[in-house]
Each structure stands twice: as structure tokens, then as C-alpha cells.
Image: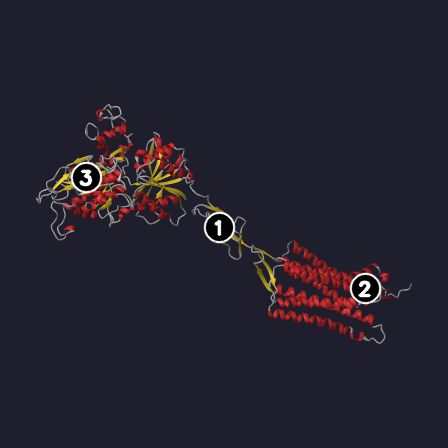
Amino acid sequence: MRCIVEQQALHIAYSSDLSPAKECSLQSSFEPSFVAEGHYVIGGIFPLHYNQEMPDLNSTYRPPAVKCNGFDPRAFRWAQTMRLAVEEINQSKEILPNHTLGYKIFDSCAYPLTGQRAALAVLNGLHEVNSPKCSGAPPLLAVIGESGSAQSIVVSRILQPFRIPMISYFSSCACLSDRRKYPTFFRVIPNDDYQVKAIAQLLLRFNWTWVGLVRGDHEYGRFAVLGLLRELEGTRVCVAYQEMIPLLYNRQRALEIMQVMRSSGSMVVVVFSAEGEMTPFLKDYMEQNMPVLQWVASEAWVTASVFAGREYYPYLGGTIGFGIRQGHIPGLREYLQTVDPQMYPSNTLVQELWEALYGCSPSPSSGSPLSPCSGQEALLEQHSAYMNTSSPRVAYNVYKAVYAIAHSLHNLVLCTPGRGPFYNSSCAQNSNIHPWQLQYYLQEVAFSIAGDEVNFDLKGDSIPYYDVINWQRGTEGNIEFVNVGLFDGTKDAGTELVIHQEKITWAGHQSEVPVSVCSTSCHPGSRKAVRRGEPVCCFDCVPCDSGKISNQTNSIDCTVCSEDFWSNTERTACIPKRVEYLDYDTLGIALTVIAVVGACLTIAVLIVFLYHRNTAIVRVNNSELSFFILLSLTLCFLCALVFIGKPTAWSCMLRHTAFSITFSLCISCILGKTLVVLAVFTATRPGNNIMKWLGPKQQRAIIFTCTLVQVVICAAWLIDDPPIPYRNMHYEVSKIILECSVGSSLAFWCVLGYIGLLAFLCFVLAFLARKLPGNFNEAKFITFSMLIFCAVWVAFIPAYISSPGNYADAVETFAILASSFGLLVCLFAPKCYIILLKPEQNTKQHLMGKQKK
């Protein structure tokens, strides 16, 4: 506080004598812009200039006065609106009858330090003269101001010890809602918490996921950016950069910011800044070869008339943002037109207004380098920075703020004893009203202007409404602020923002919504993979793996298809898995034809044997066993058909048992034949009566016994753990293979092993009888048949194990057919050859090798 006290304009000095009277001595002056007498005085602080030159503060001599430059006609209009409102109230018979309001208006130069000086100066009352006593009611009841949040923070802290309420018309920083720090602060502009929520919804609405943030070097910009970042947490919007425009403008720093904007790749930039620092920044911006950007403006500059000139449109056209809700101020246009240099010859602000609007000096003696004005200049609509009264926004806030003070003061003057701040005393005297009394009624005030409700919540905030403003080309090539939507903060979440998109003109005079993304969207069928060390909005699109899909744009993860489904080629949908089994397709039909042909050939051989059953070759080779072998071979060929088609519980049990029993029957018959052949040729030896043990009954017993063993194994198999249909999803995850699970693996390999054992025994016995005498030694053919049979089934085992899915059934079917053909050809082809083509050799003598020479 010591620094503030040393800088303040008001200095309280005590007289050198010991008199109890205190004398207020003014040490320096800070001239107001406008002053008016009244029973009750209110202050006004406006940024009538948007920049200032800092004095030399080397502390060795009294610093010179701060020099403000950059006259702002828009802020001058706000000050005139305050004057108009006070004059209306003074002329009203309904508000403060028999009382008048006075005012004292100062310029803050849009800078906190100057705003501090204005606050201290406004505390001095209506006239800055030495007063004999510092006593009585304060000379000031309330303050209208400030425009910027940083200035409002300073002014509010200065007014707080005096309990003077302050109503801001343009300070929206959320920080000012803290009643512990700013207990006397009110505002008629919505809290920035609502604005950042609206901007976040705007970014999401147009899918702008890669945006830049630029703010001013003040509390307003800092809290607004923090609030927006908080609103964007958990959304798909990322911030490409955050930059700050210096409070004391620096061109080199501004160029660095522009380079960041250029290189970021973001096409959308959100700016929380005041009109003052944006003006020099945009002037430098227009001199650079910058890409066309989509600007999103905060309420602090979205309706700034200083940017409405035609030279700004190529760079700022299409800007969209949230502006203060507009209203209607009757008589404002006519009141503004009454201001001219002749009416205020000594007011330097009016002269600066004329210089800004016409480029001429109304007072040649002022030393201005501009040429003298003719005196015939008139305020026209073309001077939009000052004369824009068709849709007042900030000026309307000033208007409401003045009326809020007037209504509160009116309620205070007409108070009811025992109520409000006077619950235990009489009402305040009209000549001794204090600011803290006025604050109570400000908190409770509620009135309407042209249908708009005006009141304050417990934090001093007003109803949150915003108009969505779009900067479009006017008829003269200038910028017009067009209302394209509304944000109503009183509505339910998600329904606050209403935008008429068809009315919007975008940056670059385009009708299509600009695209601002770090990475293009990932189409369905792919997912986002965040790049290491970069924001989540910067990603690569990775196709979904097999069996996973994404059916939305920018999916974070791919969804795994359920067990019976698989991803399509595009990875956008789960489709039923392809079901495969050994069906009657090309392979199935081929195997079926081979099986049927084999069975037919076997039956044909059987018919030949039946027809020639009395011939030597049939009789010598034991016709009964031959018929059994042919019948069993026919069944072997036909059992291959059971392996073709969709597996069912019955077909799975039948295919393995039928295969094992028929082949066991066939091999048992061949084993019996082998034993008979071996016994016949060994029975010729003297004393050998082995044939009595291998008669027809014994042969049938051998066949029955050997087959019965296989039947018992199969029965145990079916009872304990039978083969069942199985949906194989592991071998190839993209399809379902229907196959027959063998159930008990032990039983399966026992069945095959038993058949192999019979075949091996046949092979050994036939091999021993291969050199027996005779032109037709059947043992040789049995040896070859068993050799082929064993070779086929030995090769079958690894092929069966390694074959995928339905091909395993095909391999087993092929093994059945191949072994069956091997037996048929080796055992019966030579006999059929003699029967059909060499009938002369079909004699007993020839077969026994005893034919005549």
C-alpha cells in the first residue's frame, strides 16, 4: 500500500498547529473529462484512449503526467451514454423525484496505473478544492467502470476500504466474482465462465480440434484462458499454442507471436484481449504475409468499431465471437449528434474526436499538425466507431448500470424504517447517505428496461446472455457485425448455444466451415494412434487388426468382434464367420465320385467272381473269403461318404466306427486268406495236418474274433467319450471349422493301432509265403496290398495332424479310398485279368504250375 499511497493524487496533510481541525490539501490534479453537479455524485471511468506513453520513473524527480494517445471514439460513446442516462434520470418524475444525479467522468487510458489515478481522483468529489474538514458523507456514492478486468481489479481494491460499490459495464473476468476479494463489485456483463463455456461449445460444434490461444497481459486474458482450458479438458479439442500480447506493446514480440501462428498449422485462433492491445497488433499483422485464419473473438473486441474499416475485412472478415447482448437506447443518436467543438470549446476530448473522425483540427491554436476543420462537419452514420447506435452493446451496459444505481438510490431514499440496513434505526437522511447503504439496495435491485431484466446474483453477476456475432462484408466494403445466434446461460447444459449456420460467412469469404485439425480424421476401419510427445489431437490412423472393427470416425480403439463374428475387409463391421466343413463342393464331390466309383468297381468284381465262381482261380483262392473281402471293401468305399457333409452327432459317431469296423473286417478276411494260403502250401508236406485247423468254420471264427475286438474297442469308445461335432475357432480365427472331435484320443489311436496291427500281421505272414511254388502265388499280391495299405496309413498320420480344418477330413477320406483301391487292385486285378482276358490260364494245372510242357 505504501507504493499506492505515494502515487495517489490525493494527499492528506495535517496542519502544523495542534488544532483539532484537519485540512485536506490537494497535491496534484488529474483533470476529469466531464463533470456535472447533483445531489448525489457517481463516478465514471472509461478507456477514452487505448494506449499511453509511460513517463520516466527514475525516482529522482517528480514524474511528468501520463500521456495518453490513440483516441477511441467507441469508448467516448460509452461516456456520452452515461451522461445521457444521468440526464434522463434527472428529468424523470418516477426515479429520484426532487433529487438529481451528478457525475465525474475520467479517462483510464485502458491501463491499470492510469485507472488507479482516475479512481483516486474520483474519490475527491465534485470539485478538487481544499476542504477545511475531512468529515461528513463521502463525496461519491458509486462508480461506473471499468472496461478492462485488470483495471477493474485495481479500481475495486481502491474503492473497497471506502465501501463504495462499483458496477462494471465491460469487465468479465471470472476472478471478480470472488466476494471475499471484491465485496463491492457488481457488473452488468456476464461472467467469463459463461463465455469460455460458449466458446468451448462453439469449437466443438464446428469440429475445430486444433486451435491457438492469444490473450492480453492482464487478469481478464489469464483467467479466460484458464477457464477455456478447463472447459476443454476431456474433449477432442487441443491447443496448438498459447501466446500473450504484452501490456506495453512490443512489435518484436508481436512478430514472434505471428510466426508461431504461421507455423502451428492451426487455422483457428481464439483471442481474449481488449481493443487497446489488439489495435497495434492487428496493424502489424496486416503487414505480414499471414495465411487466412478464422478468428474467434471474445466479447472484449468482437464488436469494436475501430476494426470495422474496409482495410480490415481481408484479414478479419468471417470473425465469429460472442458479444454482449444488444439493446435499445432511445434518443442516443440525437444526443451524440449534439457533441461538437463549438459546444465544448475547451474539452480536448471533443477536439480529439473530431480529429479521429475527420482528420482535421477544430482548434488551429492547439498546435495540431492536422489542417484546420471547416466548421461544417456533421456526424454521420459512416462514423460507425462513434455513431453506431443501431445495436448498442457496451453502451447499453453503461445505460443499465446507471439506471441500476438510480433505482437502488431511489429505493434507499424511500426506504422503510426497520427493514434492510436500517433494521434497528430510522432511514438514512437524504443529505447523509453512505455508499454501504447503497450497496445493500444494489444487491436487491430488480427492474426492467425495454423488457430486459436487470438484477444481480449474490456474486454481483448479471444474467448470462450473449449474441453470436459474425463479421461480414457490408455494402461499402466495410465490416458489419451480424447476429447469427444466441447463447443463453440459463438453459440446460448442451442447449445453451443456438447458431444459424446458414447465415455465417467464414474467413476468406467462404461459405464452408474452415477445417482446423492437427491430423485428418481417421475413417471407420481404423483407430487413432497418438504420436509420442505430441498432443492427443496429433495422431496417425492405424488400420484395425483382423477381428476388430471401428464403425465411427476418429475411433480411439477398435472393438473386438464377438466369438461367432469376424471383421469384414474394410474393418467397419462384424460379419458372421465363414463356416467350413467337407461339404459337397469341388473337393467333396470329387471324393464322393471316387468313393462311388470304387464301390461300383468292387461290386463289379464281385459280380465277375460270382459269375465265374466255379472256375479254378476263384475256387483255388477260397471263394468265400474273396466274397467277404469284396463285400467289406464295398463298405470301406461307402464309409468314406460319411466323412462328407456337415458334421452331426450321429455322423461323427458313425464315421469313425464304420471306418474302423469295416477295415477291421476287411483286414481280418485278408488275414484269414493269408493263413489259408500259407496252410495250403505247407500241408503238402508229409505228416502235416494243419488244414484241419483252418477249415471254413475256423476261418469264420478268425474273421469274427478279429472284427469283434474292434467292435468292443469302438463300443467302449462310444460309451466313454464318443466323437462329437466341434466348432474349431482356433486354427483359423477368421472362420469356424466344423469337424468331428475324436473325443477320446486314446480310443482313436487304439482303433488305428489295431487296424495297423492286423495289417502288419498280414504283411508278415504274406511275406513268409511269397516264395511258395505256383504260377499264381496270392501271397505276393497280399504282401503288395499290405505294403501299400501300411504306406498309406503311415503317411496319413502326419498329414492328418498337420491338415487344417476340413482338409483333415479330406485327408482321412483320401486315405480310406487310397487304401481301399490298393487292396482292390492288388488282390483282385490279377484275378480279373486271368478271368476276363486269359481264360486259358484259368485252370488248376496252370495255377499250380503243373501244365504240360
Residue 155 on image: x %, y %: 23, 43
Q: Quadrant of the N terminus?
A: top left
- Position above or below: 600 against 228: below
Task: Find residue 9 and name its label.
Answer: 3
Question: What's the distance in space between the residues labelled 1 and 3, CA to CA?
Answer: 69 Å
Give amino acid for label 3: Ala
Work out whether residue 488 can be spotted.
no
Element under label 1? loop
Q: Relative to the observer, which residue lies in front, 822 or 51?
A: 51
- Residue 375 occupies quadrant: top left
- Look at the picture and state if 619 lies above or below 404: below
Q: Few, some or many C-alpha atoms within 10 Å of disc 3 (few <14, some 14-19, many ≥20)?
A: many
Q: Which residue is mark 1?
A: 550
Rounded to the nearest angstrom, the CA distance separating label 2 from label 1 is: 73 Å
- State the image coordinates of residue 727 (x, y, percent, origin top left): 57, 60
Q: CA distance from mark 3 to mark 2?
A: 142 Å
Mark 2: amino acid:
His
In percent of width and height, residue 531 lies at 46, 47
Give residue 253's quadrant in the image: top left
Secondary structure beneath dot 2 equals loop
Q: Secondary structure at mark 3?
A: loop
Please report whichever mark, 3 or 2, sits nearer to the chain's N-terminal start: 3
Describe residue 60's horizontal placement relative to residue 536 as left or right: left
Disc 1 or disc 3, which is closer to the eye? 3
**Residue 612's disc number:** 2
